Amino acid sequence: MYTAIIKTSFKASHAVKLPDGTIEEPHWHNWKLTSSFSKYSLDEFGFVIEFGYCQDIINSAIDILAYKDLNKLEIFTKNHPTTELIAKFIFEQITMRLPATEVKLDYVELTEQANCLVRYSMNE
């Protein structure tokens, strides 16, 4: 099994409802995203997925979020944009943009701030 890992970042703001019922003040993060792709065999050019092409897929997914107030996006009107929900959204956006090949998105890992991150995958 081969694995390709792509790291990137984007800025966006959010405010979430805390367990005690209070809502945070809106604040910005420099979110750090790690995406892991795997495949059992390499393509004819020796790639799991070509990095530039993969970065384009990831960028098109995070462009929806970048430099925005996530609370104002329609996708987060029912739930506050927690790191968990943002990671799931990014995972789904990347997955739907992947080519119909054997390459699989294993997980996305979204870091909100140092030592605070969420990993989302479809693994059960």
Image (cartoon, rainbow, N blue to C red):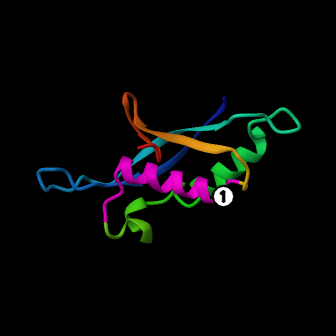
Label 1 amino acid?
A: Arg
Q: Is residue 27 above or below residue 117?
A: below
Corner quadrant of residue 61: bottom right
Relative depth, front residue between 27 and 8: 8
Could you tell me which secondary element the residue under label 1 belongs to? helix
Q: Main secondary structure of the magenta part?
A: helix
Q: Position of residue 31 (x, y in %)?
A: 48, 42
Q: Position of residue 73 (x, y in %)?
A: 44, 67
Could you tell me if residue 71 is visible in this image? yes
Q: Is residue 37 toward the left or the right of residue 87 in the image?
A: right
Q: Is residue 9 toward the left or the right of residue 17 in the image?
A: right
Relative depth, front residue between 51 and 67: 51
Question: At 21% from the left edge and 56% from the top edge, which residue is drawn?
Answer: 23
Q: Which residue is mark 1?
A: 97
- Which quadrant would the N terminus be assigned to in this image? top right
Q: Which residues are magenta?
A: 79-98
Corner quadrant of residue 72: bottom left
Q: Is residue 117 magenta?
A: no
Q: Is residue 73 above or below residue 117?
A: below
Q: Is residue 66 above or below residue 4?
A: below
- Which quadrant would the C terminus be assigned to in this image? top left
Q: Is residue 11 above or below residue 74?
A: above
How many numbered callouts?
A: 1
Q: As drawn, which residue projects farthest toward the left?
A: 20
Relative depth, front residue between 26 and 79: 79
Question: At 56% from the left edge and 61% from the top edge, which residue is drawn?
Answer: 64
Could you tell me if residue 73 is visible in this image? no
